[in-house]
Each structure stands twice: as C-alpha cells, then as structure tokens.
Amino acid sequence: MSSQCKFKRYIWELPVRWSHWVNAACIVILAVTGLFIASPASVGRAPSAFSMGWVRFVHFVAAYTFTVSVASRVVWSFLGNKYAAWREFFPLLTAKGREKTLAMLRYYLFMDKEVPETIGHNPLATTAYALLFFLYLLMIVTGFSLYATHAPQGILFTLFGWVQVVFSTQSIRLIHHLSMYAIFGFVVNHIYSAWLMDIKEHGAEVSSMFSGYRFTIHRKDD
Ligand code: HEM
Ligand code: HEM
C-alpha cells in the first residue's frame, strides 16, 4: 500500500495542531496535580514551603490554558478547513458518514482485513472526539464551579455557581475526579489507534499531527 501513497496533502492547520498538543500537555499536568489534590501530601520541608499551594496553583494555571485552548479549537471548527470543521465530529448524522464509520468499525472488529483509507479524521475516531470534547466541557464546568467557591461574589461564581445548586460540592468533586479516568481510557485507546493507523495506512498519521501533512492514495476525497 505504501508505494501507492503518492499524494501529499496539507490536512491539519496550525491551530488544530497547537490546540492538540497544548491540550495533551495540559491533561498530563492537570492529571498529575489533580491526583496530588485528591490525596494531598506535604512534599515541602516546612509548612512555609506551601507545597500543596503550589500544586493547586499549577493545576489552575494549566486549567486556564486548557480552557483557552479548547475554546480556540471550538472557534476553529467554524473558521478552519473542512478537516477541522465541526461537522467532522458528527459523522453519524449523514448516510455517507455512517457508511464510513461502519467500514472502520468492521476493520476494528476484525471483520475486514483492509483498513479503509481516510484523508482527514477517521470517522470512528471523531465520534470518540465528540465524546471527549463533552468530557473536556464537563471538566471545565465542574472545575470552575469548584474553583469559584472561594469567592461567591465573583464573576466565576455567577457563571458556574449554579452547578453547586444542582449537585453537592462533593458530588462535583467526584464527577471531576471520575471523568479524569474516562479521559485516561480515551488516551490509551487513542495512542494505540494513531500508532496502528500509522503502521497500516502508511500515510504518516502520527507525524501529521506535527507537520500537518499526510500521504494518500487518492487525489480527491471520496
Ligand atoms: C483534563 C482536565 C482536568 C483534570 C484531569 C483534572 C483533575 C483533577 C483532580 C483529579 C482533582 C482532585 C479531585 C478530588 O478532590 O478528588 C482536581 C481538583 C480540582 N480541579 Fe481539576 N482537573 C482538570 C481540569 C480542571 C479545570 C479546567 C479546572 C478549572 C479551574 C479545575 C479545577 C479544579 C479545582 C478547583 C479542584 C479542587 C481543588 C481543591 O480542592 O483544592 N480542574 N482536578
Ligand atoms: C492527552 C493525550 C491526547 C489527547 C487528549 C488527544 C486528543 C486528540 C483529539 C481531540 C484529536 C482530534 C484533533 C482535532 O481535530 O482537534 C486528536 C487527533 C490526533 N491525535 Fe491525539 N491526543 C493525545 C495524544 C496524542 C499522542 C501522544 C499522539 C501520537 C502518538 C496523538 C496523535 C494524534 C493523531 C495522529 C491525530 C489525528 C488522527 C485522526 O483524527 O485521524 N495524540 N487527538
């Protein structure tokens, strides 16, 4: 198959690549600091080292960065090229999308040997990305709601305080904590799939998230 992959195409624009890697880095930082917040341990030599305070500070800096990065990707889904468009994330809404998703599912279930070629996003993957973006939103809403409790007169509490009316503070912590494990589940599967498609399609899948370019058999999208 590799010898036929002759068309080089620019697929992932800079904002898609930047938000992808900024999100990935933030998730690692947020998970490590979040696990510390969940089971605090004083790693400083004296209370004045303020160690847990610094862990929380890093969590909040990464949280703001993550929120801006996610918001910029959402905006780019209306401004960017067709591979970045919001429609890509809902392939099940069209007959062609359902057909492509089914073909990919058949491959993953070992029912077909040949992997269907995808130029932009793999349609099965984008369905998972839509769920992942829902988890991102959940982390942001629950996170800012917890964060806003320190200042009930502030703007953040006006925006996110309602969550504390619907759920108790401890339930919000639990949702925030458990959703992290759901994100971990996605990441394990995602890295496996990116690696698998790189090997099977020979289209430079992994490096495409750095360079923006992929190699395809067909000149046009089918
Ligand atoms: C992928 C993103 C994120 C992950 C994996 C994550 C992870 C965690 C975890 C595991 C905890 C500990 C929960 C517990 O007490 O059991 C936590 C606490 C917290 N997170 Fe996040 N978080 C994320 C995003 C955010 C965002 C966007 C905000 C927004 C400001 C935020 C704000 C907070 C706050 C305020 C706490 C509680 C701090 C405390 O009680 O001292 N998090 N986070
Ligand atoms: C915390 C870790 C990660 C998360 C949460 C994550 C999430 C995502 C998301 C949401 C997309 C869709 C991009 C968009 O349109 O905005 C994506 C695409 C992609 N990611 Fe990741 N990613 C992570 C780590 C990685 C790593 C480590 C690799 C490399 C091995 C990787 C390779 C790719 C590739 C190749 C694509 C494009 C594939 C396609 O959709 O068909 N990702 N990732």
Image (cartoon, rainbow, N blue to C red):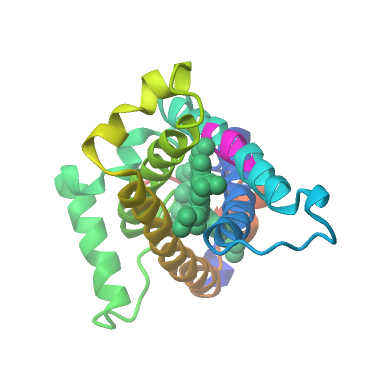
Judging depth in this view, the residue of 153 and 88 nearest the camera is 153
169 versus 185 height, above or below = above
Image position, residue 95 (x, y; %): 14, 47
- Asked if residue 103 lies left or right of residue 212, the reply is left
Q: Residue furthest right?
A: 45
- For the point 24% across and 73% down, the residue is 106
Image position, residue 194 (x, y; %): 51, 65
156 versus 115 height, above or below = above
From where the camera sits, is residue 214 visible?
yes
**Secondary structure mostly taken by the magenta-highlighted segment of the chain:** helix
- Asked if residue 180 lies left or right of residue 37, the reply is left
- Asked if residue 134 lies left or right of residue 71, the reply is left
Image position, residue 24 (x, y; %): 59, 52
- For the point 53% across and 66% down, the residue is 4
- For the point 58% across and 52% down, the residue is 30
Q: Quadrant of residue 83?
A: top left
From where the camera sits, is residue 222 visible?
no
Q: Is residue 103 magenta?
A: no
Judging depth in this view, the residue of 147 and 94 nearest the camera is 147
Q: Which residues are magenta?
A: 62-67
Q: Quadrant of residue 16?
A: top right
Image position, residue 205 (x, y; %): 56, 60
Q: Is residue 66 magenta?
A: yes
- For the point 68% across and 45% down, the residue is 58
Q: Residue furthest front?
A: 47
110 versus 100 height, above or below = below
10 versus 158 height, above or below = below
Judging depth in this view, the residue of 77 and 198 nearest the camera is 77
What is the count of numbered marks?
0
